[in-house]
Image (cartoon, helix red, strand yellow):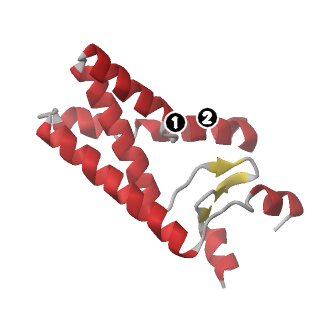
Amino acid sequence: MTDAASADTSGAVTGGVRTLLRLEGLALFTGMTLLYYIWDGDWWVYAILFFVPDLSFAAYLSGPRFGALIYNAAHSYLAPMAMMTGGFATASPLILSIAMIWLAHIGFDRALGYGLKYASGFGFTHMGRIGKQSKLTAD
């Protein structure tokens, strides 16, 4: 691993903290999906929108720094929580539905161990290394 990659990922969590973050992600995914069910949302809308945040992967075509910026913007709680607050404030079912689905997606990713990205590359996340290289460095 290069020094730059090492410096950029020194904040990756491990052990019990990583497990806790994954469990929080699972709780978020389960909670938002259950809320969407109770809300009586259309499941075809859920299915279509669930993976929309992953379109941010395309930003990596412009390089890892820009890719990480766009990916993190799409996988941070900031925008969907603001959207959910706005949805409650305006009593907008569409905005609330989109926010629930977006938060469910983020929770699903965190439960699988996918974290926010560092600029050193797609595989470097705040939840630890992901991909084939992570298995090589774990030994």
Other residues around mark 1 within 10 Å, as few (<14) / some (14–19) / many (≥20): many
User: In the picture shown, does residue 51 fall above or below 116?
Assistant: above
Secondary structure beneath dot 1 equals helix
Does residue 112 appear anywhere in the picture? no
Does residue 86 appear anywhere in the picture? yes
User: Mark 1 and 2 residues: CB-CB less than 8 Å, in contact?
Assistant: yes
Look at label 2 and name its amino acid: Ile
Q: Between residues 33 and 54, which one lies in front from this camera angle?
A: 33
- CA gap between label 1 and label 2 equals 6 Å
What is the x, y in percent for residue 4?
85, 57
The C terminus sits in image quarter: bottom right
User: In the picture shown, does residue 81 fall above or below 6?
Assistant: above
Give the residue at the far right of this rendering. 3
What is the x, y in percent for residue 74?
52, 36
Q: Between residues 119 and 79, which one lies in front from this camera angle?
A: 79
Q: Quadrant of residue 137?
A: bottom right
Residue at image point 60% right, 71% down: 14
Look at label 1 and name its amino acid: Ala
Say whether residue 91 is left or right of residue 19. Answer: left
Residue at image point 58% right, 61% down: 127
User: In the picture shown, does residue 117 fall above or below 6?
Assistant: above
Give the residue at the far front of this rendering. 89
Say whether residue 107 is left or right of residue 115. Answer: left
The residue that disc 2 covers is 70
What is the x, y in percent for residue 87?
31, 21
The disc at residue 74 is 1
